Amino acid sequence: MSRSLLKVCFAYIKNSLNLFQLIKHTNMKKLFLGLLVAAFTLSIYSCRETTEENVETNMEEVETDLEETGEDIESGFEEAGDEIEQAGEQTEQEIEEEINETDDIQ
């Protein structure tokens, strides 16, 4: 948990305990304590649910980013392969021109 969340939780508990001390009747104290526990449980459950949703969203974003990166790498390899192939063909043509002495160079 982050520090700010812990501070909020401790402030919530401290304020609740102050209210608890003001209540005189035992039955009211039990009811108040039960409601306090229920509210605290719901707030923690809500935080966990939100955290799980955030984790799922982040995992989906990472998966999408990885797929895009993989496609970019594949595209880069294809472009590099095409350039290498063109350079090879051009070199082969230059060699043939040198051999046959049909070179354009004067």
Image (tube, rainbow, N blue to C red):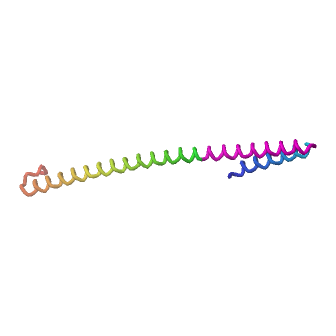
In percent of width and height, residue 48 lies at: 64, 47
Queried whether the magenta region covers residue 41, the answer comes back as: yes
**Toward which corner of the image does residue 91 lie, by quadrant?**
bottom left
* Residue at x 68%, y 51% (from the top left corner): 2
**Toward which corner of the image does residue 29 lie, by quadrant?**
top right
Of the pair 24 and 3, the residue shown nearer to us: 24
Q: Is residue 37 left or right of residue 100?
A: right
Q: Is residue 79 left or right of residue 41?
A: left
* Residue at x 13%, y 51% (from the top left corner): 105
Queried whether the magenta region covers residue 76, the answer comes back as: no
Magenta-drawn segment = 24-51
Query: Main structural element of the magenta stretch: helix, strand or loop?
Result: helix
Of the pair 47 and 75, the residue shown nearer to us: 47
Say whether residue 41 is visible.
yes
Of the pair 89 and 94, the residue shown nearer to us: 89
Q: Is residue 86 left or right of residue 10?
A: left
* Residue at x 7%, y 54% (from the top left corner): 101
